[in-house]
Amino acid sequence: MTIRDDHSLAGDLATEAGERLLELRARHGFEDQRALRDAGDRAAHVFLTEALARLRPGDAVLSEEATREERADPRRLSARRVWIVDPLDGTREFGEAGRSDWAVHVALWEDGRLAAGAVALPAQGRTLTTAKPPVLPEPAGRFRIAVSRSRPAEFLPELADQVGAELVPIGSAGGKIAAVLSGEAEAYVHAGGQYEWDSAAPVAVALAAGAHASRIDGATLTYNRADPWLPDILVSLPDLATTLLAGIRDLQSPLRKPNASA
């Protein structure tokens, strides 16, 4: 693997991890989905962490598949450079035959910002990177919001009605943000909670491409915190962000809640 810079490293690692996952999927088959998912999580984690230890030995790593003790290592919080990786985002979809909405995430958080990132979508044959950010599509005649397959926020149907949008369930967070960047959706809204590794890499690519990315109240997304839990996220084409943020704010206003005091 020839490494030129952090952007290229993120792309190369995500792509190779994805190729290994495709090989594992083909070799293992789908008869025992739980075993396939566990094997995929572990294999991609080992590959990425060993590669980063070899190629960027001075950097810290935060991985979904790390142990609780490894995640709690205080050295990560004071490190200048931290790789935030999700070895297999969309593990559920990875274990289902025919599904392509799973991904590999590799991001670099450096000096308080997302400095590089890549999202490999192996079953779709593509990797999105900050090395060459995708060109944002023009807003389509349809307004589509990518949402969680399993736990979409309760306010989303009303938000969709308010802004005239269609809700599109997609598996992994990386797949949903990639859909915004490729013109398959115009926004991604999630308020059911997730972790930093679920969004760091796709947000890095989205921001590099010029998309909007924030919390659903408009606050800046921050990473490498002691608690990696991230309650909510909004990624959209830039021209739609104001409309979506206003709609979400209106739907979450205490004045709209039946039990709110006057």
Image (tube, rainbow, N blue to C red):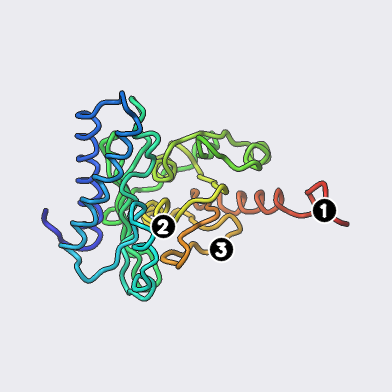
- The residue positioned 36% from the left and 69% from the top of the image is 73
Dot 1 surroundings within 10 Å: few (below 14), some, or many (20 or more)? few
- Identify the mark nearer the N-term, 3 or 2: 2
Residue at mark 1 to residue at mark 3: CA–CA distance: 24 Å
Image disc number at residue 260 = 1
Q: Position of residue 52 (x, y in %)?
A: 21, 60
- Identify the mark nearer the N-term, 2 or 1: 2
Please identify the quarter of the rendering in which residue 242 is found.
bottom right
Disc number lying in front (2 or 1): 1
- From this view, report whether residue 259 is shown above or below residue 4: above
Dot 3 surroundings within 10 Å: few (below 14), some, or many (20 or more)? few
- The residue positioned 32% from the left and 74% from the top of the image is 80
Q: Position of residue 66 (x, y in %)?
A: 33, 56
Please identify the quarter of the rendering in which residue 151 is found.
top right
Q: Between residues 245 and 191, which one lies in front from this camera angle?
A: 191
Dot 2 surroundings within 10 Å: few (below 14), some, or many (20 or more)? some
- Identify the mark nearer the N-term, 1 or 3: 3
Residue position marked by numbered label 3 in the rendering: 219
Disc number lying in front (1 or 3): 1
Three-letter residue code for mark 1 = Ala
